[in-house]
Image (cartoon, coloured by chain):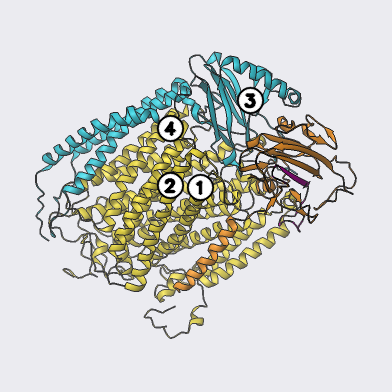
Chain colours: A yellow, B orange, C cyan
Amino acid sequence: MSEGSTATSARPLWRRLIGFNLLLAVVLGVAGWYLGWYIGKHATATSLSYFGDTDQNDISVFLGYTLGVVGFLIGLGFLQYPLARLRGYPPSLREKETEGIGRYFGLCTDHKVVGIQYFFGIGFFFAVGGLNAMLIRFELLRPTPVFNSGNYLTLVGLHGTMMMGMMTSAILGPFANYFVPIMIGARRMAFPRIESFTFWLLMAAGTILLTTVFFGGFPTGWTGYGPLNDQANYGMDAYIMFFALVGVSMCLLGMNMLATVVTMRAPGMTWSRLPIFVWGVVSTSILNLLAAPVLIAALAMGLLDRTAQTTFFISSGGGSQYLYENLFWFFGHPEVYILALPGFAVLLEILPVFSRKPLWGYRLAVAGMLGVTLLSFLVWQHHLFMSGINSNLRPFYMLSTELISIPTGFTFLCGLMTLWRGSIRFTVPMLFALAWFFNFLIGGLSGIFNSDTPSDTTEHGSFFVMAHFHYTIMGGLIFTFFAAIYFWLPKMTGLELNERLGKIHFWSMFLAFNSTFLPLFVVGFKGMPRRVVTYAPNLQFLNDWASVSAFVLGLSMLVFLGNLVYSLLFARVRAERNPWESLSIEWQLPSPVPVQNFDRIPTFESDPYGYGDGAVPVARPAGAPATGS
Amino acid sequence: MVLGVVVAGVLIGFYVANWLLSGPPTYDARTSGTTANITIQTVAAVGSQLAPHPDWVSYLIRNPSSGSWERSTIWTVPAHALVHVKILQFDGDSGLRNPFLARPEGLVGSPTLDGKPFQEINPDDASHTFAIPQLGVLVPLAGVPDDAKNQCGYAPCDPTSMAHRTIEFTFRTGKKGKYRWQCFVPCAAGFQFGFGGPMQTIGYMDGFVNVV
Amino acid sequence: MAIAHTQPGGDIHHGRRVLVLWLAISAIVTPIAVFVVGPLIPPGNGSVQAEGQVFDNQVLIGVSAPIIVFVLVMLGYTLIVFHQRDAVLEGPPVRGDSRLQLWWIVITSVTVLGLAAFGTYELVKDGAGGGQGPSATFLPSNHNQAMDVQVIGQQWEFTYRYPTYGGLETPHLYLPADTLIRLHVTSLDVVHSFWAVNLGVKADANPGTDNVVYVQTKHPLALNIRCSELCGLWHGYMFDGQGRVVSQSEFASWIKQQQALYGPVLKYLPPYSTTYSPEPQLRAG
């Protein structure tokens, strides 16, 4: 590992590896695992005799995971500051920000470092989830199973769970952490250590999820319905642990964002001058904060059912599977808006820059985001339309679900009118942003079909729903995720991404994505349920079409990976300070942004959308030169 | 560093492929173009020599050439053929959750229990079933009474000395295909509803009949 | 940066062109979508509820098609006409138009509320083939003459019981044609979902719950029945292609045949009930 230009560059490698960092974290994590496993094995009451019949001790696994995570976090150094304060040391907010590349592999309180850590961490799990998807489509090439059917169910579950758990932080993690403090004129987040904590917790959670393979996997898919989750092998505990930790991470991330935006805005940064990206982050953070705890509660009950033989979700024991379904979807619906809203935020942030026009309808756009946030808590039973809920509830939830398309439509209006009569530049980020309109249109309208209860009778639980949410989440979020990457990575790393490869990536991804998921609407209508290994032979052609397109989609991701590796490791072309000629404050700073962000806290005089009327940059950050370069 | 990542990726790829394709070996039960013979034992605990989960119930198939019992639940049989099955049932009864499944069906002729033909069994006496729903085949397997002497502990079980029931039946296969078979008795001890663990893992109480 | 923001023409000019394009294309596309493509969309006309769903889908298509055309026309027009033509050109500093915003809110709200009202009407008529739980409130007009049939989901097969025929249980579902059926869907273990694709019926099978769904059969039909809620290893194989809707006389003779076949096992079955709790209900062993 190469060292940055710091005073301690003379220390040999082995000395630099000692200390509270990732290496120690892994060692202590593994030690914690074995300790927990041992305690579980020997401290389990003998009355839980079923452990002997099943050859699976859930308590060992759960304690092992818990102590493993604790060990991992201690190894990273998260206990150091609390212990130091207990011993009377003075408070400090920032640590380990000057160690060169080593600071990316441990606890660092620089929000920009956390942003880059998130980028690579989430990127890794996205790649794993994507590979899972390729394997799933491979299996679905023929109606006869190729893989072990039980492990295939785990594969399906892994794909869904990894994506739903990790991609909630896809934009909030890398980009909100990096840019929200800069956009509001602050030097840090409100709670820098918690920011780093959310990242490492997510990494620990992802690792735990991958270990489910060693314990027989889990058969429930990402929704984890009871009572099937009670029946499952002890791979299910990995799922429970993963989502519980992700829930904690999401909750803390949301809290941190909200605290930062509410309390740390620079002078002049009023609520009506906030970049729309920050508004999107605020809306998402409200959802994060309020929805995640419900999931943790539901999972805790599931864990008790599996270990202490409670019957929260077993109807004959006095519980009900409806309890799980309602708790899960009370979280689950805001969860999908946690995935969609950052997409809106990035979209509306990028469109003005490349249309050279102000954001049209700023207040309407904000109202749209907040409207979605509020309404998303009122619609969850549309996942339960066919489940036997009280039939009088169904018209209400049909109405509320249809209503949520109104604030969503505001984003469409503001986006389209921003483009209207602009001077549109077709850069790579702009292409990805434009694709959002097409994808989310189809995704949103198929959502209208799903929200209509009579129509939902055929669509629920089929591939139609699957195509719907892939259009909104992948077509909406992931395309804007890549837009954000191409837009902001030059600022984060100081290096350009190759434009030609970017365009190849965009076109192959856009065409392959639509080719993959459009036929799946038809497949769903024709009677193919979700999460199956076999299907009616007349559906094979459409499935094969979708599978081959999916493989091309996977290849397009490789193009992106190649672009990343080539641009960051080999070509290393220095990026200009403001290649997109944006008026937003982060583009007035050097690339990459220096540790303290600004020399002096800036004073804001307007929002960053003053295109078209000879606007000056949004603030005068004293760290940046007043004119030119 | 890039090379290291690539090598690690390839190794992980091999592991994942192995995991996805894992499962019991396929056993070829064909004896001629139009017949197949299968001799099975169903056991209460499969033992650590045959499986990583020693306390799980399982089906085992007898390999006539070696005489040993193998843990395979994927059997190859010919199409449009008669398949003769003999099951040595060593496990105690658990009872059927749906008593409807106590009536054998989809067979050629009557199945026999300890040599005597039967039309249905008492559902509470069922220890396992052998069912291929896509072919309409269903055979309930009666259990060893609780007070029988010399019950088998861990597999493989010896039919000459240990208590067991013998069930024989014949069914006819149709077109080519891969048909799943399963047990319908909640025999997975320790799991919710008795349907977890071995009841949901191919290689114990579930498998495929490969009709070729 | 020079601020010459003049694209040819003004808002009205471009707006009118977009409107005309939208109207023209919608006028062609929407009827094709609603009347040609619409009827082809499953679930078809196997039951009154299925037909209702097809009609419902047609209305939804009729509303969605113009919306799709609008967004695509707007997007396409904008991207073609307003792309940057000069290195220093910027757009006009327009930040909003409250009249347009108001119109948009009104139009989208009216559309959405209209769709919700229509959907509610279709739902309230007869339940639209979806499971309504134990106390169904959306009853078809002739619900008092409905024939009860129970669907029991278990890992991993559906079986069916006919209370009107002494609680007879059968492995395949036969229904008489031209009859209103009240299906009682329940489960013995985990959550399954009974989906009769070409009847347009879907109801989750929940343990300890009776999920009622009404379906009025029409003509004889081969049923495609699939489980549509992940229920464990063989969820993908939990399907049945041997269900049928048959004429009433054929149904009567089928019942006799099933009674002869499954009569002997009837004595072991628990009495017909809307829910069952067979042992083991908790962990076995």
Q: Chain of mark 2?
A: A
Residue that numbered label 1 is attached to: A140
| Three-letter code for the amino acid on which mark 4 is drawn | Tyr
Q: Is residue C166 left or right of residue C182?
A: right
| Three-letter code for the amino acid on which mark 3 is drawn | Thr
Query: Would you place residue A121 above or below residue A336 in this image?
Result: below
For the residues beneath circles 4 and 1, the answer to whether they share a chain is yes
Residue that numbered label 2 is attached to: A546
Residue that numbered label 4 is attached to: A397
Earlier in the chain: of badge 2 and badge 1, it is: 1
| Three-letter code for the amino acid on which mark 1 is drawn | Leu
In whole angstroms, how far apart are the C-alphas of marks 4 and 1? 34 Å
For the residues beneath circles 1 and 3, the answer to whether they share a chain is no
Q: Label 1 crowding class (10 Å Cα cut-off): few <14, some 14-19, many 20+?
A: many
**Would you say the residues marked 4 and 2 are in contact, meaning their CB atoms lie under 8 Å apart?**
no
Give the quarter of the figure containing the N terminus of chain A. bottom left
In whole angstroms, how far apart are the C-alphas of marks 2 and 3? 41 Å
Label 4 or label 3, whichever lies nearer to me, is 3
Q: Is residue B74 left or right of residue A537?
A: right
Earlier in the chain: of badge 4 and badge 1, it is: 1
> Based on the displayed image, in which of its 4 quarters is residue A301 positioned?
top right
Q: Which residues are magenta?
A: B32-54
* Residue drawn 61% across the image and 25% down it: C150
For the residues beneath circles 2 and 1, the answer to whether they share a chain is yes
Q: Label 3 crowding class (10 Å Cα cut-off): few <14, some 14-19, many 20+?
A: some
Residue that numbered label 3 is attached to: C274
In whole angstroms, how far apart are the C-alphas of marks 4 and 3? 27 Å
Q: Chain of mark 4?
A: A
Query: Would you place residue A64 above or below residue A299 in this image?
Result: below
Q: Chain of mark 3?
A: C
Query: Would you place residue C46 above or below residue A440 in this image?
Result: above
What x and y, as percent, mark residue A219? 59, 47
